[in-house]
Image (cartoon, coloured by chain):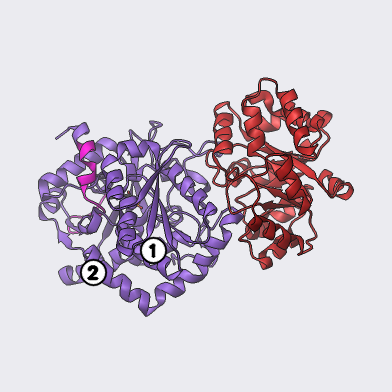
Amino acid sequence: MIRVDEKGFYGKFGGAYIPEMLHPNIEELRENYEKIIATEDFQKEFRALLKDYVGRPTPLYFASRLSEKHGAKIYLKREDLCHTGAHKVNNTVGQIILAKKLGKKRIIAETGAGQHGVATATVCALMGMECTVYMGALDIQRQRPNVERMKILGAKVVAATSGSQTLKDATNEAMRQWINNPVDTHYIIGSVVGPHPYPEMVARFQSVISEEIKWQLKEKEGTENPDLVIACVGGGSNAAGAFYHYYNTSQVRLVAAEAAGLGVNSGKSAATTALGTPGILHGSKTLLMQTEDGQVVEPHSISAGLDYPGIGPVHAHLFDIGRAEFVAVEDEDAMKAGIELSRLEGIIPAIETAHALHALNMIEYKKDDIIVINLSGRGDKDLDTYIKWGGY
Amino acid sequence: MNRIDHLFDRKKERVLSIYFTAGFPDLEDTLPIMQAIEDAGADIIEVGVPYSDPIADGPTIQESNMIALNNGMSLKKLFDQLKDMRKKVSLPVVLMGYLNPIIQYGMEEFCKKCQELGIDGLIVPDLPMQQYIDEYKEMFDRYGLRNTFLISPQTSEKRIKEIDDYSNGFIYMVSAHAITGAKSGISNEQIAYFERVKSMELKNPRLIGFGISDAETFSTASQYSNGAIIGSAFIKIIKNSKDLKNDIKSYIQSVIK
Ligand SMILES: Cc1ncc(COP(=O)(O)O)c(C=O)c1O
C-alpha cells in the first residue's frame, strides 16, 4: 500500500524536518487539514470552485494523430485547459479555502516559473486576501510575463536574492517569512514537497486529476484503468495527482519524466532520481541532488518548473520500491516533443509537459496499450523559450 | 565534566555566547577567531557549519554561509581545522549546523569526531525533537554531547516542558518569531515572553538569541535568562574587520562591560 504514515513518511521518505519556530504552524495544519477538508462545507465550496471557476472536469481527449504516430491509444488529460493554464490552480483553490477556515489573513507562496505564483495570486484576488510571492531574482528576469500577471492580480512579488536565486531559494525565503509571520499567515506550497503534511495535502487536492481520469476512461474505454499513466515531475504535484488513485492498482504502469537538462551526466541537469541521494531538503527527507558534503546542487532544466534539485517524498518512495518508472528527458528532446504535439494535435504544451510527451520515445509499450499523458500545462508562458530555441 | 555543564555550574548570569560561521571571512580564520573570542572574555563559542540552504537564518548569516562555502569550507575541512583546538581553546564549544551535511557525513561518525576534538554540544535547528528522541539521543549521550533545542514565543508551555525534559546543556530562546538578525531592540511583548518562560522554572539554563547586538540588548536579555547569544551582529563586525583580534576584543568587551 502506498500511503503516508502517522509521522508523514512514505517508506523511508517524508517527515517534517523543520526549525522549532515553524512547529506551531505545521502542527496547526497537521491537526486540522484532514478534519477541515472532510467537512461537507469545505467539499461543497472546493467542488463548486473547481467546476465553475477552474473549469473542471478537464477533458480526457483521445489524441488520434499522436496515437497513430506512436502506435498506442493515447489520451491527454487536459490540465492545460484549467483557468490560469496549468494544474497548479487545483491546489491553490484547495489551500486558500483551508487558509480561510483556519482564520488566516495573508498568503505567501514560492514560485519558479511563475505558474504557481500566478495560481496563488489568482485565488487570493478571488478571496480578497493579501498575497506575497517569493521568486528567485534570476527567475524574475526569465519569466517576466508571469511576474506582471501576478502584479496585475494584486500580488506583491519579492525577489529572493540569496544562493542561486531560483526556485529553491524562493522556497527558503518563503519559509523564512513564514517563521517571521507565524500567526496570521498561511504558506501555500506549490508542489508535493515540504514538511508533512504538505506533500500529502497537495497530492489530495491534485488527486482530482486521477479521480476524473477513472470515470472518463470508463466512459470511453469501458475500463477505469489505463495501461500507463505518464506525467512530468518537478516537485511532482501533477504526477502525484495523475497517479494518486492508481498508486495501489499494480497493473497500471506509472511513468515519471524528469528533466535531464543538457544530459544526465553533463553537470547541467535536474534528473533527481538519476543523480540524487537521500537527504533533507525544505523540511522533508527525500532524494536530492547534493555534493558529497551535503550541500544542495544547482539544477538545470530548460523548463523553469522542473528546475528543482529534489522531488516530493512520495516520488522518492515510488522510485525506491520500483512502483514508478523514471525517465530523464533532455532539453532538446522535450522541445521537439512540444513541437510534435503542436503540429499533430494543435496543442502547444508547456515545456514541463513536453518532457512527459517525449517519455513515449523512451519506454516500451504494446500497440493496443491505453496511455494517459497528463498534459499539465499550456505553452503560452513558454513562447519566449520556444522562440529562442527556434527549431520549428 | 562537560564544559557546558561546568560553565553553568559556576556562572548563572550574563553568560555570553558568540556565534560565527566557520571559514568566514577567510577559510583559515576559524581557529584564530575562536581564540580571539576566548581572549576577549566571552563564555561559549558557537561554530556555525555552513550550509547552502539555511532556512532559519537571515541575510547576514546566509551571506556568511555562502562566502564560507565558496572559500571551500566543509565539515571535513572544519574537523581538520579543529584538530588541535583543545591546545588553544578552553571555552565550551558548540557546533551549530543544519541536519543534511551532518547526515551525509554520518551521524555516528560525526558524534565520534566531535567527542575526539573536544566539542561539547550541538545545535541542529532542523532536527525535530521526536526524531532526536527516537534516533539520536542515545548516541549524543554516549559521546558526551549536549543538545540544545530552540523555543520561540509561539512554543506552547506543554512543548517547552517537553523540550526542557529532553534537553541538556542549555535551551536557546529565540527572542521573537523571527529568523536570525531580523530585528533589533527588545519590545514589551518580548519581555512578557521572557518573563513567562522565566516563571516556568525550567531545569536547564536559558540563553536568549536573535536580535542581540550590544551592551543594552545583552543586559536586558540577561535580566530574564542566564545570558544571551550574539550571531549576526558579530558576523557584521568580522566581515569588515582588518584586524580580527583587536576588533573582536573591543566589540565583545563593549558588550560585556
Ligand atoms: C505546466 C507545469 N507542469 C509541471 C510543473 C512541475 O511541477 P509539478 O512537478 O509539481 O507538477 C509546473 C511547474 O511550474 C508547470 O507549470
Percent x, y of residue A193: 44, 54
Same chain for the residues under marks 1 and 2 in the image: yes
Q: Which residue is mark 1?
A: A95
Magenta highlight on residue A162: no
- The quadrant where residue B154 appears: bottom right
Chain of the residue where label 2 is placed in the rendered structure: A
- In the rendered view, does A44 fall on the left or right side of B239? left
Please, what secondary structure does the residue beneath circle 1 have? helix
Percent x, y of residue A2: 43, 64
Quick check: marks 1 and 2 in contact, CB under 8 Å? no
Viewer-side residue, B96 vs A273: B96
Mark number, residue A51: 2
- In the rendered view, does B117 fall on the left or right side of A289? right
Percent x, y of residue A183: 52, 61
Percent x, y of residue B155: 63, 61
Hue of chain B?
A: red
One can see residue A282 in this view:
no
Magenta segment boundaries in residue numbering: A364-386
- In the rendered view, does B201 fall on the left or right side of A155? right
Q: Which chain is purple?
A: A
**Relative to A69, residue B28 above or below:** above
